[in-house]
Image (cartoon, rainbow, N blue to C red):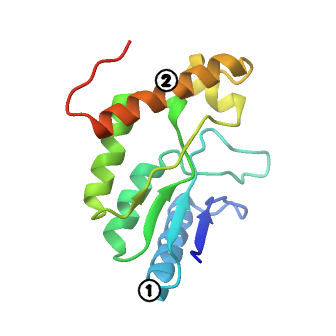
């Protein structure tokens, strides 16, 4: 059985941001040293402040994963999820592939469509969650491009 840790990095105590990031680093290094944890997963959230100041505060799980990869040796590192509908598909494919190389093959690519409308309308108006069929079509198209980018030497897409 594999054990994974979902690290949502929510700032419940309104800490300074660098303290939240240091907590994530400490958790990641602890899990890495234990050799009983398979994967640590990071979520992607944007603009998620609330009245109390708490927030889900990782806008780029790929960039955070690169930082964690440099600090660990064993644990796999995943995104749960990179919101595919917010990214340029080629850039997302390149960034995840580059991360996997930086992490010596320890990356799990987790992709999602997004769950918060406020994020979608600010990150990619075409991914507006009020139009679920359109959002789903964009997600499927992005997945098709990612698969092509990761498996083919050259490809085209219409």
Residue at 59% x, 17% y: name it.
Answer: 125
Q: Nearer the viewer, residue 64 or 23?
A: 64
Drawn side of residue 151 relative to residue 140, left or right: left
Residue furthest to the top? 158
Circle 1 SS class = helix
Position of residue 63 relative to residue 130, above or below, is: below
- The mark nearer the N terminus, 2 or 1, is 1
Q: CA distance from mark 2 to mark 1?
A: 39 Å
User: Which quadrant holds the N terminus?
Assistant: bottom right
Residue 128 x/y as whole percent = 66, 21
- Within 10 Å of the Cα at label 2, are there few (<14), some (14-19), or many (20+) other Cα atoms? some
Residue 56 x/y as whole percent = 65, 51
Q: Nearer the viewer, residue 63 or 19?
A: 63
Position of residue 45 relative to residue 91, above or below, is: below
Residue at 57% x, 75% y: name it.
Answer: 2
Drawn side of residue 89 relative to residue 154, left or right: right
Circle 2 SS class = helix
Residue 91 x/y as whole percent = 34, 33
User: Which quadrant holds the C terminus?
Assistant: top left
Residue under label 2, please give it: 141
Residue at 51% x, 64% y: name it.
Answer: 21
Circle nearer the viewer, 2 or 1: 2
Residue under label 1, please give it: 33
Residue 45 x/y as whole percent = 60, 44
């Amino acid at each position: 059985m594999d054990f994974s840790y979902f690290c949502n990095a929510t700032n419940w105590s309104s800490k300074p941001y660098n303290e939240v990031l240091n907590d994530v680093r400490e958790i990641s290094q602890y899990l890495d040293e234990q050799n009983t944890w398979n994967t640590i997963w990071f979520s992607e959230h944007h603009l998620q402040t609330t009245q109390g100041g708490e927030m889900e505060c990782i806008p780029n799980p790929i960039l955070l994963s690169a930082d964690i990869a440099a600090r660990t040796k064993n644990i796999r590192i995943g995104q749960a999820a990179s919101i595919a509908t917010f990214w340029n598909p080629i850039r997302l494919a390149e960034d995840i592939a580059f991360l996997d190389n930086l992490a010596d093959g320890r990356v799990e690519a987790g992709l999602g469509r997004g769950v918060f409308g406020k994020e979608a309308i600010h990150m990619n108006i075409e991914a507006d969650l009020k139009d679920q069929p359109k959002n789903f079509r964009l997600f499927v198209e992005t997945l098709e491009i990612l698969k092509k980018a990761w498996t083919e030497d050259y490809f085209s897409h219409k």
